[in-house]
Amino acid sequence: MVVRIVRLGTERAADEGTRIGTVRRPPRGVPKTEFASRNWYDVWYPNLAPSADVMKQGQEATTPAQWAAFVKKYRAEMAMPEASRTLEVLAALSQHSNFSVGCYCEDEAHCHRATLRALLAEKGAKLA
């Protein structure tokens, strides 16, 4: 059993399980009834997405220093009690079931999901 970190909208792995969208906004132009069938996500959980201001900072980051500043702020958001408890729940669930979390960004290295992967690992999640 594992948690996968995925790009939303891509083909699902054979036994990926529930796909959780950790994005600030739903996909544009897609009816809610088609989110799952089009491989976006089964459940929308924006609580693990960066806040709007921090997300903008990450999208505009062009240097390693700017990216590091984004990661620092996102990690601070995820250290807040509600987010931290969510990460702990997901880490525990990864021991017993398959599921995935993801975002739309093409490049995981320049996306909050890279930090989300690290945070889940730090909480003891089993990662694919």
Image (cartoon, helix red, strand yellow):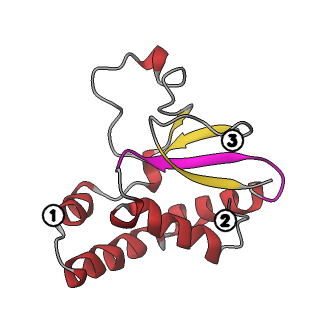
Quarter of the image for residue 25 reads top left
What kind of element bears circle 1? helix
Q: Which residue is mark 3?
A: 16
Q: Amino acid at mark 2?
A: Glu
Inspect the image, locate mark 3, and give the three-letter code of the amino acid beneath it.
Glu
Residue 100: image x %, image y %? 61, 47
Image x and y of residue 13, in percent: 65, 40
Q: Amino acid at mark 1?
A: Glu
For residue 60, which numbered disc appears in the image?
1
Q: Residues within 10 Å of mark 2 (few under 14, many from 20)?
A: some
Few, some or many C-alpha atoms within 10 Å of disc 1 (few <14, some 14-19, many ≥20)?
few
What residue lies at 34% left-to-right and 31% top-to-bottom?
Answer: 27
- Residue at 36 percent across and 33 percent down: it is 26
Q: Nearer the viewer, mark 3 or mark 2?
A: 3
Name the residue located 54 percent from the left edge and 34 percent from the top edge.
Answer: 11
Would you say 66 lies left or right of 120 here? left
Q: Are marks 3 and 2 in contact (CB under 8 Å)?
A: no
Which secondary structure, mark 3? loop
Q: CA distance from mark 3 to mark 2?
A: 20 Å
User: Residue 63: where, in percent of width, then height?
Assistant: 18, 78
Among numbered discs 1 and 3, the one appearing first in the sequence? 3
Eyeballing the image, is 55 above or below 122? above
**First in residue order: circle 2 vs circle 1:** 1
- Residue depth check, mark 2 versus mark 1: number of the one nearer the observer: 1
Residue 116 position within the rendered picture, expressed as x and y whole percent measured from the top left: 50, 64
Q: Which mark is residue 88?
A: 2
Task: Name the residue nearer the viewer: 51 or 9.
Answer: 9
Range of magenta residues:
95-105
Question: In which image quadrant can residue 123 be found?
Answer: bottom right
